[in-house]
Image (cartoon, rainbow, N blue to C red):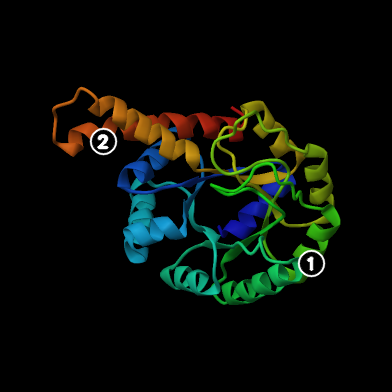
Amino acid sequence: MRLQDKYKELRNTSAALLATNFYNFETLEGVLQAAVQSNSPIILQLTRSSIEYMGLPMAFQMAKTAINYHGVKAWIHLDHGDSYDLAAKCLDAGFDSIMIDASEKPFRDNISTTKKVVALASKYDACVEAELGYVAKLGQSTEKEGFTMPEEASRFVNETGVDALAVAIGTSHGFYKKEPRLDLERLARIREVTNAALVLHGGSGVPHTTLTKAIAAGVCKINLATEIKNIFMKTLKAKLENETEIDLRKVFPIATEAVTILVTEKLNVVNNK
């Protein structure tokens, strides 16, 4: 099933998918083990930095091979794609879905950039996600506000034809200094005036009860990245603190297992288990 078709199914049933970033074999394996154990479909995400770290063919083929090996229903997605060129390379590689993030550009420029990527992706029958509003990225101010306006969301989706739209309703990337308060009424209004699948970026650290309410209000995709990196590195550092073992094949599995436990917990929330 194409991801864009899955999104339509999710909108009709007020359900969502978990979208997880991976950074190496160990985090990929940890995520997919969770999907196997919970019998859940999942989206695997790669950013530009992860692609540059692993190499595009290597990263994509590793994910594709792992999906087939585990027999998991999964889609490979470009997260926060920042250029037409990167989107094109990912589509050529075989990605199921791409995000073009021109949200920091003026509204009209965001529309025109997104339209070009949507036109390109249609030739590959691939899904496209865009972003509208201000969702603070790592290192950016979380004090600035730029919530997505329903009327602009409606116009944006109609003019671009995107399948999924990341909305700004109170989340940010990275860890929160205080518990985020999401504008769920705004989210519900955006859902009413658009037919796109709505995406919640900055899912790390959002309370589980809030995630459940967001899904009920219209979110179809929840992104998880920071918590994956954090639990992997914290677990690995704790393991290595008094460890003399130099065989990484004996050291890394405990951190991989920690990722599996985390993602299984998030999948249970998303699946309302």
Q: Which residue is mark 2?
A: 252
Q: Is residue 47 left or right of residue 28?
A: right
Q: Quadrant of the C terminus?
A: top right
**Considering depth in this image, is 163 or 41 the residue closer to the camera?**
163
Q: Amino acid at mark 2?
A: Phe
Tell me residue 189's x, y (percent). Answer: 84, 47
137 on left or right of 244:
right
* Quadrant of the snapshot with the N terminus: bottom right
Residue 93: assigned label: none
Counting from the top left corner in percent of width and height, residue 78 is at 50, 59
Q: Which residue is mark 1?
A: 158
Under circle 2, the secondary element is helix
Q: Residue at x 84, y 50 (%)?
A: 192
Q: Which one is earlier in the sequence, the residue at label 2 or at label 1?
A: 1
Foreground residue among 30 and 100: 100
Q: Secondary structure at mark 1?
A: helix
Percent of width and height locating residue 263 = 47, 34
> Label 1 amino acid?
Asn
The picture places residue 26, in percent across and down from the top left corner, at 32, 42
Rate crowding at label 1 as few (under 14), some (14 to 19) or many (20 or more) other CA atoms within 10 Å: some
At horizontal 61% and vertical 72% (from top left) the residue drawn is 117
Mark 2 → mark 1, Cα distance in angstroms: 47 Å
Vertical order, 70 against 79 (above or below)? above
Identity of the residue drawn at 62% across and 28% down: 208
Q: Is residue 35 visible?
A: no
Question: Do the residues under discs 2 and 1 have CB atoms within 8 angstroms?
Answer: no
Q: Residue at x 50, y 74 (%)?
A: 85
**Would you place residue 28 above or below residue 244 in this image?**
below
